[in-house]
Image: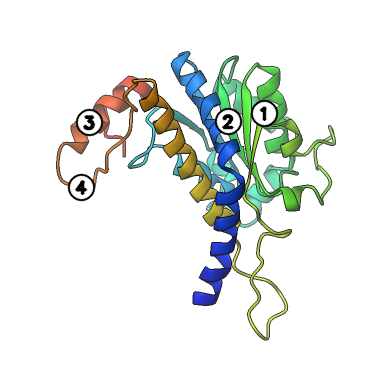
Amino acid sequence: MNDYLEHLSKFLKSASETQDENIGRAADLVVESFTGNKNFFVFGSGHSHLIAEELYTRAGGLAFVKAILPPELMLHEMLNKSTLLERLEGYASALLELHQVGRGDTIMIISNSGRNSVPVEMAIGARERGARVIVLTSLKHSSRVASRHSSGKRLFELADVVLDNQGEYGDASFYVKGCDIPTGATSDAVGVALAQALTVRIVERLVQRGIEPPLFRSSNADGNAGDHNARLAETYFGVKAAGA
């Protein structure tokens, strides 16, 4: 266990040392959208949806985040279903239309490989609609593979800002003695850390502007979290419900 955690810490340290400027640039895009009464969307398929959920309706999370997380692109419905679906062209265009992504919005698209059709098409379509694109990916992996989209583009080539999770090619990168197949993926752990770092930087930017950040409280802590979250849910989602 300790060997793997030490291994993982190297990736977190590398992200800390290299991604600060890009986190700041990404935060500025989100704040610009929010203060301009536009939207901030997050999207990820497969395991990447876990990172998108880190930004969405959770304790300490910003209430204005809107998630594009169709269940068929997650992993819980059937083995390999999301793997096959995220290679289909035309799918992301429908999602962008359904969620009304448009000019002045910002969308964060998460994909470790950055090669599959749905996330690539999501970026292309968002840009065509006038939205800005933040990408969270592994540059080391994505730069070594060909796109599966007819444009030939990989996700990082379509971004206004790229957040690099510093991951190795193939993601899993820890070797157990006696086993020649790597295990211990790093993209989710580092991706979640970068997602939370982005949230923190957005909050910092809002406070610097004299704007109270609309943050959910933990509904599992004592106090007035329920009422507080219900107010945020009504303001940003139009529903009377607790948020986090």
**Secondary structure of the residue carrying numbered label 3:** helix
Counting other residues with Cα less than 10 Å from the Cα at mark 3, is it few (<14), some (14-19), or many (20 or more)? some
Q: Is residue 191 left or right of residue 84?
A: left
Mark before the other along the chain sequence, 3 or 4 = 4
Residue type at mark 1 is Asp
Circles 1 and 2, Cβ within 8 Å, touching? The answer is: yes
Q: Residue at x 72, y 47 (%)?
A: 139
Q: CA distance from mark 1 to mark 3?
A: 34 Å
Quadrant housing the C terminus:
top left
In percent of width and height, residue 160 lies at 67, 28
Q: Nearer the viewer, mark 2 or mark 4?
A: 2
Residue type at mark 3 is His
Q: Residue at x 54, y 33 (%)?
A: 24
Q: Is residue 177 left or right of residue 36?
A: right
What number is the disc on residue 160? 1
Which residue carries the number 2 mark? 25
Counting other residues with Cα less than 10 Å from the Cα at mark 4, is it few (<14), some (14-19), or many (20 or more)? few
**Secondary structure of the residue carrying numbered label 1:** loop
Which residue carries the number 4 mark? 221
In percent of width and height, residue 108 lies at 58, 34
Q: CA distance from mark 3 to mark 2?
A: 30 Å
